[in-house]
Amino acid sequence: MQTPKRAFITGITGMVGSHLADYIIKNTDWNITGLIRWRSPLDNISHLLSSINGGDRINLVYGDLRDAISIDKAVEEVRPDYVFHLAAQSFPKTSFDAPLDTMDTNIQGTTRVLESLRKHSPNAVIHVCSSSEVFGRVPKEKLPIDEECNFHPASPYAISKVGTDLVGRFYAEAYNMKVMTTRMFTHTGPRRGDVFAESSFAKQIALAEAGYTSPVIKVGNLKSLRTIADVRDAVRAYFMLLTINPQGGEYYNIGGNFSLEIGELLDYLISISTIKSELTVELDQTRLRPIDADLQVPNTSKFERHTGWQVEIPFEETMLDLLNYWRDKVKNEGNNFLAR
């Protein structure tokens, strides 16, 4: 009998990492090791803890992207066949307050992961997760954004992802490693962090529906144009990236096919609320970024041609699932949240 492949997911406790683990468990016989920090919240993988505790196809190792020794030990222990490098400081607004931590975690952290893989698993098939934020301030005439669009990052986070993007391609070209880089555009759904606009809106609506807060939705820039994908479509894309004729050094834009302004997204969430007639919207200056990447519409044809991937989950289903996720959390945990 053939030994199952070993998948290594950095950032397994995040929204994307946890959904990716679900997808791999459901669709393969692979064994999974997830990299977590000692203080990582386990909420997003709570449904997997019985399997983790029982050693049933999934286990965890401790490490921190800012600690080269811990990363090297983890990679040496796992020696993976497939690597999904998702861990990052992933909040653009936070990066304005903590730019150096963001750069270290995302650029040098990626270098530490790839250097350890070069030593211990040089034949691994590796996904490095960059971001659509690398494109930043894009003029309208360059929409939809293809892979060759110039980088014009609009936050320290975006700058760090430019570095991540280039580091991934460097290791592919310099060391003949099978590293592929993705620039995923906005992707959301259940387990999305509340520091992101649409999840913050959904959480605020859920808290107001339950009577814990007043029916006022605090917002930042509502004019940014975004193309929305479902996280479950995103992780399927990542799996296909590494399993359908993977080409080291390639880079792909991935995203949804439904574009709208953030204000329109908010209007839709309000329209499916049980208290939609009571909800009002209020600008909160603290939610505004010094600069915003306000035109984020992808051209995904390169990735679709290579893998056959297509969007499957419609925008409306994603938004309802996101709102229901927060409704369930509020029901189970009350108002034990920061109202952000």
Image: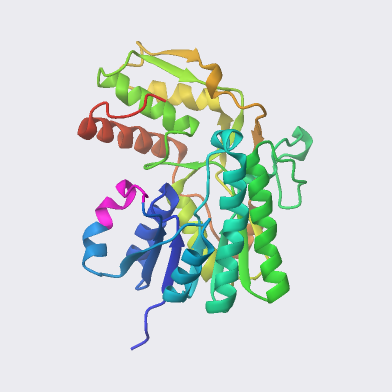
Q: Is residue 332 shown in magenta? A: no
**Residue nearest the viewer, comparing 216 with 78:** 78
Image side of residue 325 versus residue 35, left or right: left
> Which quarter of the image is occupied by the N terminus?
bottom left
* Residue 300 point in image, percent of width and height: 63, 51
In this rendering, does residue 187 appear at all? yes
Identify the residue at horizontal 51%, vertical 57% (top origin).
Answer: 65
Q: Is residue 145 above or below residue 220?
A: below
Look at 25% across and 17% down and name the residue there. Answer: 211
Span colored in magenta = 39-48
Q: Is residue 304 visible?
A: no
The image shows residue 275 at horizontal and vertical percentages of 31, 16
Residue at position x 48%, y 75% from top?
Answer: 81
54 vs 174, left or right, is: left
Residue 286 vs residue 232, the one in the foreground: 286
The colour mode here is: rainbow
Asked if residue 124 lies left or right of residue 247, the reply is left
Task: Work out whether 77 lies above or below 1.
Answer: above
Image position, residue 25 (x, y; %): 33, 64
* Residue sitting at x 38%, y 53%: 18
Q: Overall secondary structure of the magenta stretch?
A: helix
> Which quadrant would the C terminus be assigned to in this image?
top left
Total number of numbered discs in the rendering: 0
Percent across and percent down for residue 199 are 43, 33
Does 201 appear above or below 128?
A: above
